[in-house]
Amino acid sequence: MLKKTAIALLGASSLLPLATQAAEYKIDSEGQHAFIQFKISHLGYSYVLGNFDDFTGSFDYDPDQPEQSSVDVTVDVASLDSAHAERDKHLLSSDFLNASKYPQATFESTGFESTGDGEGKLEGNLTLHGETQPIVIDVDHIGGGEDPWGGYRQGFEGTTTLTLSDFGIDTSKLGPTAKTVDLYLVVEGVRQ
């Protein structure tokens, strides 16, 4: 009887990996499958677009309990790239981001509210330019599944708008329409 019970337990445990489970995912920024992009008005006549190329992070995600999700990300501010070296130098100077004094930006989630169909609101604290403020990111689950290399991935996209004065950033030299910056995020994570 003991032998049959042990066989039954082994059989049942072999099914567990197939079930949906909460897991930690490392953001695949090294493989260029994750992006942090920005868009800000320039004098009200056009936009400056760019990315932050270097960042690391992870997230916990359970599709059966998305409200239990959490995210931690650290961004190297000096990795800003707007495809114009002189402009990047100016944006990273003490006139704007002051990357030498504040080399990192961090985001730590504090909650997630599902709004249905894989969408939700991710709340958290963003520290940028030495100031920490609560923000909300609108999130959409793109998909998840096995990859060709034997791993398992989940992917999301998100958008938010930051009011730069909330973080002590003076945008007056960019014109009156540059009070906010739009962020577009694509996050693909590999299950650990």
Image: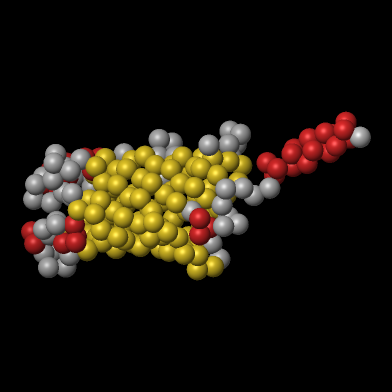
* Corner quadrant of residue 86: top left
Left or right side of 159 for 68: right
Where is residue 130? Give x, y as percent.
18, 49
Tell which residue pokes out farthest to the top in this image. Answer: 3
- Image color mode: secondary structure
Tell which residue pokes out farthest to the front in this image. Answer: 2
Assign the N terminus to one quadrant of the image.
top right
Give the residue at x 13% y 51%: 96
Left or right side of 98 for 33: right
Where is residue 50? Give x, y as percent.
27, 50
Left or right side of 142 for 49: left
Give the residue at x 46% y 46%: 59
Left or right side of 96 for 19: right
- Can residue 159 be seen at all in this image of the molecule? no
Vertically, is 77 above or below 173? above
Where is residue 113? Give x, y as percent.
47, 64
* Corner quadrant of residue 118: bottom right
Q: Nearer the viewer, residue 170 or 86?
A: 170
Where is residue 150? Give x, y as percent.
61, 34
Tell which residue pokes out farthest to the right in this image. Answer: 1
Vertically, is 46 above or below 132? below
* Corner quadrant of residue 121: bottom left
Give the residue at x 49% y 42%: 25
- Can residue 163 be seen at all in this image of the molecule? yes
